[in-house]
Image (spheres, rainbow, N blue to C red):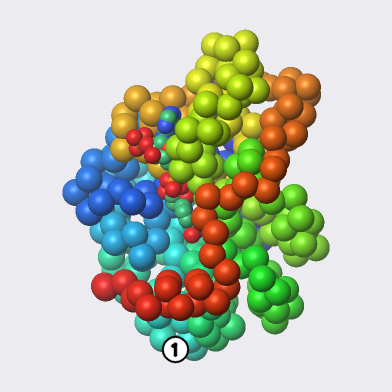
Amino acid sequence: MNEQTYVTLNDGTRIPQMGIGVYMVAGDDLTERTVAEALRLGYRHVDTAHAYGNERGVGRAIARSGIDRDEVWVTSKLWPSEYGEGATSAAIDRMLARLGTDHLDLLLLHQQFGDYLGAWRDMERAVAEGRVRSIGISNFESDRLEELCEAATIKPSVLQVECHPFYQQRALKERVSRYGTAIECWYPLGHADAGLLGNGVIAIIAEAHGKSAAQVILRWHIQTGNIVFPKSTNPAHLAANLDVFDFALAADEMAAIDALDCGKRFFNMTLEQQERTLGAFAPED
Ligand SMILES: NC(=O)c1ccc[n+]([C@@H]2O[C@H](COP(=O)([O-])OP(=O)(O)OC[C@H]3O[C@@H](n4cnc5c(N)ncnc54)[C@H](OP(=O)(O)O)[C@@H]3O)[C@@H](O)[C@H]2O)c1
């Protein structure tokens, strides 16, 4: 039980269930060092985005690691400023150049506004051309989720959203189940929220297993079937976060964490606020 686990997506590909996320890892140099350390520890899944401004660092770490490219799962995300038929295809080429690779394992629409239907058509073409293996979406929680899924020829393989013990996304999982879409959890540790990492229920379970609260939360995600990629630039945390495959939570422990679901999310923006504030941003190449 010491081995990384995988989730089989609706297109038949197998994604490592645990990865490293590099949101707010500032700049390519720190990103390269962080991802290099993660790969050395055994991580084989990196979650980045054009908007994070560090895809070059991710690409350099993988290229210099000596690990076969096919053994590392790379996810990145297109920003709405890159959405639209033709424009998205060109943006994918620029993304591949930044990452220094000839294909992405998973490409996501980062946000649920802009010309996402035009972008999706280009993403489907990129799959046919072999530039991208799997395609999915992020932050689609409005009725635009169903609009896109119904219009899509290739149904999204994943939906990446905020998800942790305080906000477990059960209704959203139900909505996407008919498309076979898997849930990827951002803020898997609640962005290190003290109330979550210091929660009493989790502390008791952690003590029983000789693990940290973060490890128990990540183990809960794994047993729930979620795909996770906690962010850390701290080598001790990186090692600890991968060290969750040598123990299992019992059914009553899983149920106790399931019961912490309280609708508390750490990122709250209406669709209108998302379009207005996030839509004002356009990442540089
Ligand atoms: N699609 C989207 O819109 C979206 C939005 C947000 C995030 N994401 C993705 O999800 C990933 C994870 O989200 P996130 O980074 O914001 O939140 P997170 O993984 O829930 O939390 C990261 C925080 O937890 C700390 N941490 C990590 N491991 C720890 C441990 N073992 N013990 C104690 N603290 C620990 C980190 O600090 P240290 O660095 O000091 O360890 C950091 O402050 C991102 O990197 C990104 O790939 C996607």
Quadrant for ligand 1? top left
Q: Quadrant of the N terminus?
A: top right
- Within 8 Å: ligand 1 and the Cβ of disc 1? no
Please identify the quarter of the rendering in which residue 226 is found.
Answer: top right
What is the x, y in percent for residue 94?
A: 32, 74
In the rendered view, tell whether residue 70 sits above or below residue 38.
Answer: below
Please identify the quarter of the rendering in which residue 41 is found.
Answer: top left
Side of 38 where 109 appears, left or right: right
Secondary structure of the residue carrying tag 1 is loop
Please identify the quarter of the rendering in which residue 258 is found.
Answer: top right
Q: Nearer the viewer, residue 44 or 271?
A: 271
Name the residue at the bottom extreme: 86
Q: Nearer the viewer, residue 175 or 207?
A: 207
Amino acid found under the numbered disc labelled 1: Gly
Q: Nearer the viewer, residue 12 or 108?
A: 108
Q: Which residue is mark 1?
A: 86
Q: Residue at x 62, y 47 (%)?
A: 264
Q: Residue at x 34, y 76 (%)?
A: 282
Side of 281 where 6 appears, left or right: right
Q: Does residue 143 show up?
A: yes
What is the x, y in percent for residue 165?
A: 64, 38
Characterize the local packing of mark 1: few (<14), some (14-19) or many (20 or more) Cα atoms within 10 angstroms: few
Q: Does residue 72 show up?
A: no
Q: Quadrant of the C terminus?
A: bottom left
What is the x, y in percent for residue 139?
A: 57, 64
What is the x, y in percent for residue 219?
A: 60, 29
Q: Residue at x 76, y 55 (%)?
A: 171
In the rendered view, tell whether residue 235 sits above or below residue 77.
Answer: above
Q: Residue at x 36, y 65 (%)?
A: 51
